[in-house]
């Protein structure tokens, strides 16, 4: 018989033994840590592969079948006037070579005064009213324009409007002659590098051709115009694709295929498309007004370099330097001055001239916009009522034929004070003042910065100068400071720009 203590102790031992038995049983049922690790790894791989598979289209066939009827071939005809001759020498009757050149180069009618030249491109239908979008260079100079559909039907088109700056044109066809299938604009701002895209066009006149790839880059500047902001893609784009659409995987147009980079003339996987956000606004204006209506700030601008930033007291090169402010422009009326640096336009930070030009151009004519500036080491804001770029008048052209007067050499430049002879030769107003560059040492920094004879120095370190003596005095003041360069506002013809030149101490 057990005592109470013994009974209690026996119960505890029995309980511990039961727990150990239960733990061992559960351990046998559970997988080992290795199995758990491998299982977790396989699950991760499974979901990763499935995720990638979902992002990559299994086929483009359904999308191509749906969108192809909207993409058209643009055929143009241009009348070329014959200027006479056929490129071969002409010999008098009876000359020994007369028959030879007649056989090999003289076939055809030399008296024919004109001939027809044809070209092909692509385009796409954007609404049921018969509006078709293509590139400006596809129809530029054309006397006749035809839109050819997938089934071969050919319909004459009239030109609604063009915009050479971003290479876009809008055509109009009679919608009663064809059941039209239109496409929708997409938002190119949402397109990301690496996204799948599909291009449809008519390369080399072969007919409807579908290619696919990804977006390779955004915001490309290929130096084709003032508002370059191209989408770069590796989807094959060739001659004849110009004006065709670049689609996203929702079937929306996010770009107009416009240019390729190629040394052979064929696709090497570098193509460029005008983004839809830029093209759509232009197309809407061409349809509504027959022309573009872009915002106009009325300034001459240049990028801020490191030496310019040092001269202006800026911490970095972000911003756009105002090099000139025409008196008939909106910026002048708002109190913006040459030497100001634009930091923000309408609340948007601007880092370079191309960015500012595009933002201003995309703004509404007549809009009142806040412009944040850097002036004399401080920030300030001016409100500008934008004008219309298309109505802005061309500035006066100048001449570089300058007669010399008393001159002085400054920083590798031979300078002279403007006199009546200089005003007359440069077609300046009687009130025009400043200092003219008579000659430039080819080995000087001024020559490297492309200062040339005939240029006029209007300001030195943001101070207006009327004589060579004032230029020298300002330079002497600079030498007494810790600045390494001097800032000069230089005018050539109708344009002005700032140049920073190193000073010798």
Image (spheres, grey):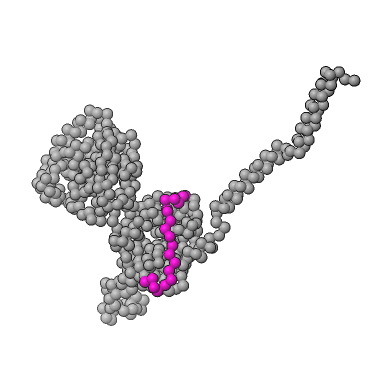
- Vertical placement of residue 243 versus 18, above or below: below
**382 or 119, which lies in front?**
382
Measured as percent of width and height from the top left, residue 230 is found at: 39, 53
Measured as percent of width and height from the top left, residue 170 is found at: 35, 64
- Vertical placement of residue 468 versus 73, above or below: above
Q: Magenta stretch?
A: 174-193
Q: Residue furthest right?
A: 1
| Dominant SS type (magenta) | loop
Measured as percent of width and height from the top left, residue 13 is found at: 81, 24
Q: Residue furthest left?
A: 420
Dividing the picture into quarters, in which one does residue 240 lie? bottom left
Dividing the picture into quarters, in which one does residue 183 lie? bottom left
**413 or 53, which lies in front?**
53
Q: Residue furthest bottom?
A: 94
- Vertical placement of residue 148 versus 275, above or below: below
Residue at x 25% of width, y 56% of height: 390
Side of 485 relative to 401 (left or right): right
Side of 82 relative to 32 (left or right): left
Question: Total number of numbered labels?
Answer: 0
Residue at x 65% of width, y 42% of height: 41
Q: Is residue 7 visible?
A: yes
**446 or 101, which lies in front?**
446
Measured as percent of width and height from the top left, residue 465 is found at: 16, 38
- Image quarter in which the C terminus is found: top left
Q: Is residue 394 found inside the magenta-colored segment of the image?
A: no
Residue at x 42% of width, y 62% of height: 244
- Image quarter in which the N terminus is found: top right
**34 or 181, which lies in front?**
181
């Amino acid at each position: 018989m057990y005592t109470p203590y013994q009974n209690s102790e026996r119960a505890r031992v029995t309980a511990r033994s039961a727990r150990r038995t239960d733990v061992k049983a559960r351990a046998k049922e559970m997988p080992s840590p290795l199995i758990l690790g491998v299982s977790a790894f396989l699950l991760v791989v499974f979901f990763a592969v499935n995720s990638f598979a979902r992002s990559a289209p299994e086929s483009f066939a359904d999308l191509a079948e749906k969108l192809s009827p909207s993409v058209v071939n643009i055929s143009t005809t241009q009348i070329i006037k014959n200027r006479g001759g056929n490129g071969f020498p002409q010999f008098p009757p009876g000359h020994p070579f007369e028959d030879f050149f007649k056989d090999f180069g003289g076939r055809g009618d030399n008296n024919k005064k004109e001939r027809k030249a044809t070209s092909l491109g692509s385009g796409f239908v954007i609404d049921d009213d018969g509006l078709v979008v293509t590139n400006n260079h596809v129809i530029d100079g054309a006397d006749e324009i035809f839109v050819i559909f997938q089934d071969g039907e050919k319909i004459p088109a009239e030109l609604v409007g063009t915009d050479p700056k971003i290479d876009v044109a809008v055509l109009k066809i009679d919608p009663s002659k064809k059941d039209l299938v239109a496409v929708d604009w997409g938002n190119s701002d949402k397109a990301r590098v690496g996204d799948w895209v599909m291009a449809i066009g008519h390369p080399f006149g072969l007919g409807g051709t579908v290619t696919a790839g990804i977006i390779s880059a955004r915001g490309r500047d290929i130096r084709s115009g003032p508002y370059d902001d191209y989408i770069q893609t590796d989807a094959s784009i060739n001659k004849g694709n110009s004006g065709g659409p670049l689609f996203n995987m929702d079937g929306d147009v996010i770009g107009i295929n416009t240019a390729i980079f190629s040394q052979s003339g064929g696709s090497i996987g570098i193509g460029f498309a005008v983004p839809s956000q830029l093209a759509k606004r232009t197309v809407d204006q061409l349809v509504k007004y027959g022309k573009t209506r872009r915002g106009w700030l009325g300034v001459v601008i240049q990028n801020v370099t490191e030496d310019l930033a040092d001269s202006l007291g800026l911490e970095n090169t972000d911003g756009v330097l105002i090099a000139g402010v025409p008196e008939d422009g909106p910026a002048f009326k708002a109190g913006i001055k040459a030497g100001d640096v634009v930091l923000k336009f309408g609340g948007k930070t601007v880092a370079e001239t191309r960015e500012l030009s595009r933002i201003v151009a995309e703004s509404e004519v007549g809009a009142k916009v806040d412009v944040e500036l850097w002036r004399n080491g401080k920030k300030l804001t001016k409100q500008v009522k934008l004008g219309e770029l298309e109505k802005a008048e061309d500035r006066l052209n100048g001449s570089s034929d300058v007669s010399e007067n008393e001159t002085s050499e400054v920083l590798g430049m031979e300078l002279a004070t403007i006199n009546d002879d200089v005003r007359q030769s440069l077609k300046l107003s009687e009130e025009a003042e400043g200092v003219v560059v008579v000659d430039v040492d080819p080995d000087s920094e001024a020559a490297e910065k492309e200062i040339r004879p005939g240029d006029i120095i209007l300001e030195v370190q943001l101070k207006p100068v009327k004589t060579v003596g004032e230029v020298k005095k300002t330079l002497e003041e600079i030498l007494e400071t810790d600045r390494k360069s001097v800032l000069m506002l230089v005018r050539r013809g109708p344009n002005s720009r700032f140049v920073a030149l190193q000073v010798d101490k």
